[in-house]
Structure formats: structure tokens, C-alpha cells
Amino acid sequence: MRGLIIVFCCSILLSFSFIIRILYSWNHAFRSFPYENEFAISDMALIALISTITLWKHLRLRKLNKTGPSARIASNDERVRFNWLKAYRVAFFTVLFIQVASKGPIMIWGAPWDVPFQSQLSLSAAITTVLGAFVFYNRKDRHE
């Protein structure tokens, strides 16, 4: 669970990185972001950290599943699967909302108010919401 919370915090930072760039471009008449190189380096470091933790958790769970059937059954619990499915539903609607909200200014004003980094923002928001929702839903089941 600690690994999921660390990945969740990293994905929040990644999302805020793209939100800061979008707000800067809107407030400064679509000029380029002055700290783009520093933010790009931090984004790559966060993505590497997220990938490393996720790979480590996957390999650890895979090794644990080989040790015995009880560990395999515990990791494949119905409640855990249902919590993941509920979390995926929240992430899907988040990505859908971001896509619609990013095209809203174009439809309303008709001006070229395109959102920069739209795909990166959608991906980082999806990771953030799926992990946050899973941690939230899984927290309720732990106290039964």
C-alpha cells in the first residue's frame, strides 16, 4: 500500500506540473514557459520513479505468488478486483472530463485557445485518479 501512495503522490506532482504550464500559457498570451527544461527533467524523473516503483511492486507480487496458493488467492480477491474496477470507472470519467473541458474554450470563444500538454495532462490525471480512488475504496474494505 505504501508503494501505491508514493506513486499517487508522484502522479499528483506530475499533474500539477502540466497544470502550471497550462495556466502560464493562458495567462501570458501563449508565450513559452520559461522553466520548460527544468520541468521536463523533473517530469522525466517522476515518470522514472513511478515506473521503478510499479515494476518493483509487480516483481515482488509475482515472486510472492510463486511461493504458495494462499498468496495467489489473497492477491486475487474479489473485493480488490471490484475496487480496481470502481477506480477505473472514476479515471475514465476524469479523462473524459479533461478532454471535453480542454475543447470547451474553442467551442465557446472560437479562438485558438488550445490546451498545451493535453495528452500528458490526461495521462497523469488518469494515473492520479485511478490510484487515489483505489486507495480510497480499498481503505473502506480494510476496516471490515
Image (tube, rainbow, N blue to C red):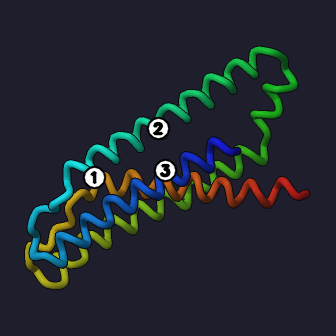
According to the picture, the residue beneath numbered tag 1 turns out to be 39
Residue type, mark 3 in image: Cys
In the image, which disc is placed on residue 49? 2
According to the picture, the residue beneath numbered tag 3 turns out to be 10
> Residue 106 location, x and y as percent?
16, 76
At a point 32% along the width and 66% down the height, the residue shown is 19
Position of the C terminus by quadrant: bottom right
Bin the neighbour count of mark 2 within 10 Å (Cα to Cα): few under 14, some 14-19, many 20 and up: some
Disc on the earlier residue, 2 or 3: 3
129 sits left or right of 111 in the view: right
Q: Is residue 85 above or below residue 101?
A: above
Residue type, mark 2 in image: Leu
Bin the neighbour count of mark 3 within 10 Å (Cα to Cα): few under 14, some 14-19, many 20 and up: many
Pick the residue in front: 110 or 140. 140
84 sits left or right of 35 in the view: right
> Residue 91 location, x and y as percent?
50, 57
Pick the residue in front: 31 or 64. 31
Residue type, mark 1 in image: Phe
Q: Secondary structure at mark 2?
A: helix
51 sits left or right of 62 in the view: left
Q: Secondary structure at mark 3?
A: helix
